Image (tube, rainbow, N blue to C red):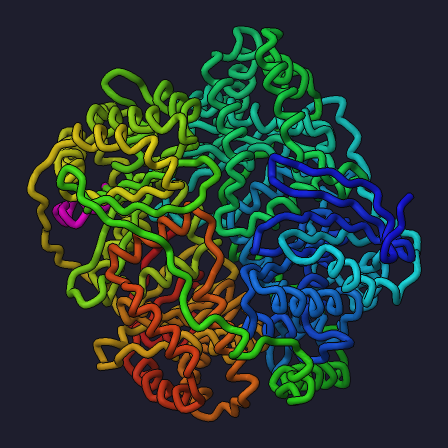
Amino acid sequence: MTVHNGFELLKQQYVPEISTEIKVLRHVGTGAQVLSLINDDENKVFGISFRTPPEDSTGVAHILEHSVLCGSRKFPVKEPFVELLKGSLKTFLNAFTYPDKTCYPVASQNDKDFYNLIDVYLDAVFHPLITPYIFQQEGWHYELESEDSSLSYKGVVFNEMKGAYSSPDNLLAEYSQQSLFPESTYGLDSGGNPEKIPDLTYERFKAFHERHYHPSNAYIYFYGNDDPEKRLRFLRTYLDDFSAVPADSSVGLQPFFDAPRRIRRGFASGTEAGHGRGAKPRGMMTLNWLLPETSNATLNLSLQVLRHILIGMPGSPLRKALIDSGLGDDLAGTGLENELRQAYFSTGLKGIDTDQADHVEKLILDTLAGLAGDGIAPEFVEAALNTVEFRLRENNAGGYPRGLVLMLRALSTWLYDGDPAALLAFEAPLEAVKSSAAAGKRYFEGMIERHFLQNPHRTTLILKPDPTRADAEEARERERLAAVRSTMSAEQLRAVVENTRELRRRQEAPDSPEALAAIPTLKREDLERTNKKIPMEETFPEGSRLLFHDIHTNGIFYLDMAFDIHSLPQHALPFAPLFGRALVEIGTETEDFVSLSTRISRRTGGIRPDVFTSAVRSSPHGAARLILRGKSTVPRAGELFSILRDVLLTVKLDDRERFRQMVLEEKARQEQRLIPGGHQMVNLRLRAHFGEADWAAEQTSGISYLTFLRKLVSDIDENWSGILATLEDLRHVLINRTGMIFNVTADRSDWSRVRGDFEQFVRELPARPPGRCDWHPKHNPELEGLLIPSQVNYVGKGLDLYRLGYRFHGSVQVITAYLRNSWLWEQVRVQGGAYGAMCLFDRISGILTFVSYRDPNLDRTLEAFDRAADFLRTVNLSEDELTKAIVGAIGTLDTYLLPDARGYVSMLRTITGDMEEDRQRMRDEILATTTRDFRDFAEVLDAVRHHAIVKVLGSKAAVDDSPIGRSGKIELVTVL
């Protein structure tokens, strides 16, 4: 075995699929495992992961994930993680708790910054402070203001998981997994059940770190174009301090059941006003199967293809059978879960009458039996294979760094003592799957028979709505706290009061300058002085507008088509998202939606709609676009154009039943967003008051859109002719090349090969003089309580600063980020116990908003928002802290974008008038920010304190119990 620089080289191979050399190594002294991926990607990724299977549902792994980032031996500040958020060029910085592992990944394009991040993370995981006070802050503690006040629970993870347990979809996913793994660690909640979290002691928390956070249990990952030798030298500065120990963290297998099982659970639901379809809240159910281990790469890929065959396309046979049944609103379940040691499959329906669950179960089993017996149509197999292969070759990680996605893929085999490269080198297993599918031996039919129909390890989970559950959960918590309080002596009560005060004192105490100086950061001279420009050429073929971006895309052709929905009358605006879906999901004059969706998956990398709205620089009117985003390999660009031609010119909008299905799905998805994305809904509701574009966004993706969808469900039967007329009007108005923007991202050589076909496609589209409709927004109340059955709140406050006379200066980007990572973090998260809080400023519209996330408080948070101005006025900002804040703002400005995202962002900047010279001026002002700018902005925030509007999304009890609720001025709206 080759030993080099303290590491054994276990394996080395070049993987052409991802243009990467892979080295698998082991640290000689500790046994720490290292996966080193060497390539030319400048967006470098590091991650250290540990196997952390929990033994209960107290959330110990999750709390530890938070806590190790709260100070360490080398960096003894309260929040090294936050200091990195303030002052790094990071392109990714976070940590994840999975059911059996905890991961700490970072990414940066800057070498110096990259190793600064690694240094802090390695010290955090191996040498954390994790004092009892850190455990109380991040996990849970008793809070008691005085000896005669009520006892309460506080803690960041405690409230985060209260938010998670308020989401029915989260509960469905959690309970589905647990139902399959009653004898495995996967049958527990690694995130923490709020009712179990207070059972966790500090001693068990500390012991969990000692047992699991050791190099002998570590999986260390590098990716990118940094020096591979430097990686190993740097690791040794930490690993050489340890000796090998037994790493008893293996994940055991769940034994297979002898017979299927059925589980019924409840979830907190709202009233009938929030559901729209039927007279009572509706439930959900899943059918779940345990599958083999994930380490077999060929089987793993085969299951991914099978998932796409069954439910991955609008016309997929199992999806279609479920939706066509009319038994529910939308698909439920996680689909295929293949990142754990044993895979599982979960599917079902949401929005069901739970008395009909047997019918849903029978439908799923009968559909699978039909597919196994009668065979799967070859076009479904071809479509699924093409989609899975396209995604693997494109390697498009969306907003995540590519290296991070590859790390998680490697861990799905590596963590269980398999080959970490098994799924990275996908060519061989993919070819094996394709060959098996082509052999004519009913390959996927056999998988259905073997893994589903003949598999007794199946559970049926029925989740029933319970309007009394939220109140009952709150009552149980009060009773538990009252029981605890009743057992405390006067001395013990005084101790809890003193502990509450001491914890707050520690939270409020500033870090010393010496401790802060230990955090590694960049200097201003390390920063680029100019923005990275995205190449763009503008032409006007056939009277349309074409933006071309000459960017290397590895043989992928990206085409965006932006339709101007500002040409629609106001009443038609909320139909825009549905019309976008209809274009690719309802069918054409020659193909039903099943054939069309299959054709899209067979011939392209996908076509999907999006709605974009924004203020426009130096214009009183906003921009509003429905964007159809398509992609294909360059050789198949002609087929992409052919499909787009068909959907734009021959879409068949008069299929009422298919349209009803899309409306029900859309409604279900909007309801699903409310609790996990409550901060986004509140932010959108606030912004809708101040600008036409944000009002339009709320009409097409916010609570107003949900209200529209609920009414539309009944209108489909009562006024179908009117709805169809509106959809036809959208088609006539929007499909007009003179009002469209075409956005192409591709290599110039590839573009030259397809440009002729593109121009022919454009010529075939109608051309009319573009129009513009005036919209007259009707605003909601300025003080509004939006009611949902949730154990936590989402609190927002906002104002249009430009209406007050504020003129944009780049320093605001530094200041708002600093507020988010200092004042709001400390007041709302650390001391208030919320999961997070944000200060957001849109420099195009001038709207500033404060928003909190999974927040146990309401008025306390609003008070923190109001006191932000005083904080800025009095904050003692050292030159080092100012530099750190500037670095962080530049990092946000220089966020890493994949090729398709670069072209798309460039188009959006063009639509909003966000010119390059304005962006460079902003960068110059960011780099020149002074402490005086912070003081000056405090005066601006004073206006927010006195004139801003307020929105709260939360439970009726939380609103009613607050001063703003008791004021009689707030208007209440039942949302769920």
Residue drawn at 29 percent across, 66 percent down: 971
Q: Quadrant of the N terminus?
A: top right
Front position in the image: 199 or 345: 345
Above or below: residue 760 compared with residue 121: above
Front position in the image: 834 or 237: 237
- The location of residue 111, given as percent across then percent down, is 62, 64
Q: Looking at the rendering, which quadrant does residue 774 occupy?
A: bottom left
Q: Would residue 314 be visible to someone looking at this image?
A: no
Decide whether residue 570 is among the magenta residues.
yes
Report the magenta residues as a range. 565-575
Q: Is residue 218 left or right of residue 871?
A: right
Decide whether residue 337 is among the magenta residues.
no
Q: Would residue 231 be visible to someone looking at this image?
A: yes
- The location of residue 627, given as percent across then percent down, is 29, 43
Residue drawn at 53 percent across, 21 percent down: 364
Above or below: residue 155 compared with residue 293: below
Residue drawn at 31 percent across, 35 percent down: 581
- The location of residue 373, given as percent across then percent down, is 56, 7
Q: Is residue 728 left or right of residue 506?
A: left
Front position in the image: 416 or 765: 765
For the image, the number of numbered tags is 0
Above or below: residue 509 compared with residue 768: below
Above or below: residue 463 compared with residue 138: above
Q: Looking at the rendering, which quadrant does residue 642 occupy?
A: top left
- The location of residue 38, given as percent across then percent down, is 67, 48
Q: Residue furthest left?
A: 769
Residue drawn at 46 percent across, 80 percent down: 864
SS assignment for the magenta stretch, majority: helix
